[in-house]
């Protein structure tokens, strides 16, 4: 076979279910800060015309999503569905993308808006209180707070003599390498915060530090945010399994202390006995 013949022969790309699922790994539940694939929110994937000639994009992908309840927040639901459509559309060889949300009280509205590429405000109109950018910003700040708390709490656990007040002086370079630090760096980057080794770890969403006397309270507030995220994730997993028989097989479960796919560590929730 000659080189000229090789150049003339059309190349093909194959769009597979696995490729679609991998693209959906990047889509996070905005409140729970976990991939929708790990939470079991991806109900089905169907690819039609997966083998595509180079330069042609005619593969159609249909994705159905499901949520733990029919009354999950519509703006969260739309955000996940919209992000899913964008993630799948970015796969080489994909042309048309259909993403539908099943069994939600706003399914018809959300699905119609996605099909028409109407955008968030175009879909919800007067009911859209915030823009998608504002919504993303809110949950990016919460995700950063939780990631920051995980790193600092790990330091406290590793050194029982470390006073909480000293955490305000911890720099990124002081954190041990690992998934918790990597997750924090990604979340800082999303907020436009410095990732330099000499940058302080305990900061607000604007990068402002806390005086020593305010550090314990800032840490407690951060811990409250992290516990809320982790607790909601656990609760939603259980609700989904109750609502959809067999959906547990689609959820990623980890032994205590293991890392989830988006590479932040979930600290175990400790329930303290009340003082008598």
Image: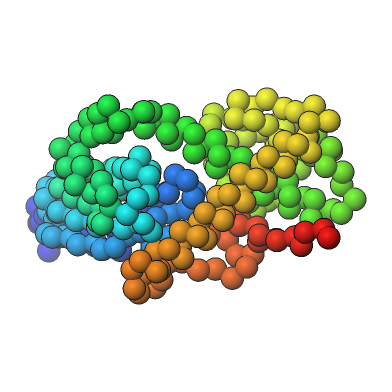
Looking at the picture, does residue 255 appear above or below residue 130? below
Q: Is residue 190 visible?
A: no
Splitting the image into 4 quarters, where does residue 78 fall? top left
**Observer-nearest residue: 231 or 156?**
231
**Residue 111: x, y in percent?**
20, 46
Numbered marks: total: 0
Quadrant the C terminus occupies: bottom right
Residue at 42% in and 34% down: 135
Provide residue 252's location: percent of width, then percent of height: 46, 66
Q: Which residue is found at the position 38% from the left and 44% from the top?
A: 73
Give the image quarter of residue 103. Answer: bottom left
x and y percent of residue 241 in the render?
Answer: 40, 68
Q: Quadrant of the N terminus?
A: bottom left
Side of 151 where 38 appears, left or right: left
Q: Is residue 246 above or below residue 215?
A: below
Question: Residue at 64% of width from left, 30% of height from top?
Answer: 204
Vertical side of 202 occupied by 14: above or below: below
Position in image of residue 254 (x %, y %): 54, 68
Query: Coloured how?
Result: rainbow
Q: Is residue 260 visible?
A: yes
Q: Residue furthest right?
A: 161
Residue at the location (62% across, 68% down)? Answer: 256
């Amino acid at each position: 076979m000659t080189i000229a013949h090789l150049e003339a022969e059309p190349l093909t790309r194959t769009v597979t279910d696995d490729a679609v699922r991998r693209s959906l790994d990047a889509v996070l539940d905005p409140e729970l800060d976990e991939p929708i694939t790990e939470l079991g929110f991806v109900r089905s994937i169907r690819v039609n015309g997966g083998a595509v000639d180079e330069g042609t994009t005619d593969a159609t992908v249909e994705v159905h999503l499901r949520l733990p309840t029919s009354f999950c927040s519509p703006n969260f639901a739309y955000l996940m569905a919209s992000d899913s459509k964008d993630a799948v559309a970015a796969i080489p060889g994909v042309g048309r993308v259909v993403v539908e949300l099943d069994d939600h009280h706003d399914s018809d509205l959300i699905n119609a808006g996605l099909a028409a590429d109407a955008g968030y405000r175009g879909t919800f109109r007067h009911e859209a209180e915030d823009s998608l950018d504002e919504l993303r910003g809110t949950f990016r700040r919460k995700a950063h707070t939780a990631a920051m708390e995980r790193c600092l709490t790990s330091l406290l656990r590793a050194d029982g003599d470390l006073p909480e007040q000293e955490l305000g002086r911890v720099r990124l370079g002081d954190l041990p390498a690992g998934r918790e630090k990597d997750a924090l760096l990604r979340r800082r980057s999303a907020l436009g915060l410095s990732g330099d080794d000499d940058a302080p770890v305990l900061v607000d969403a604007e990068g402002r530090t806390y005086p020593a006397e305010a550090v314990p309270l800032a840490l407690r507030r951060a811990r409250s945010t992290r516990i809320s995220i982790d607790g909601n994730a656990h609760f939603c997993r259980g609700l989904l399994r109750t609502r959809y028989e067999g959906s547990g097989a689609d959820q990623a479960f980890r032994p205590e202390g293991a890392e989830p796919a988006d590479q932040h560590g979930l600290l175990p929730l400790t329930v303290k006995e009340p003082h008598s």
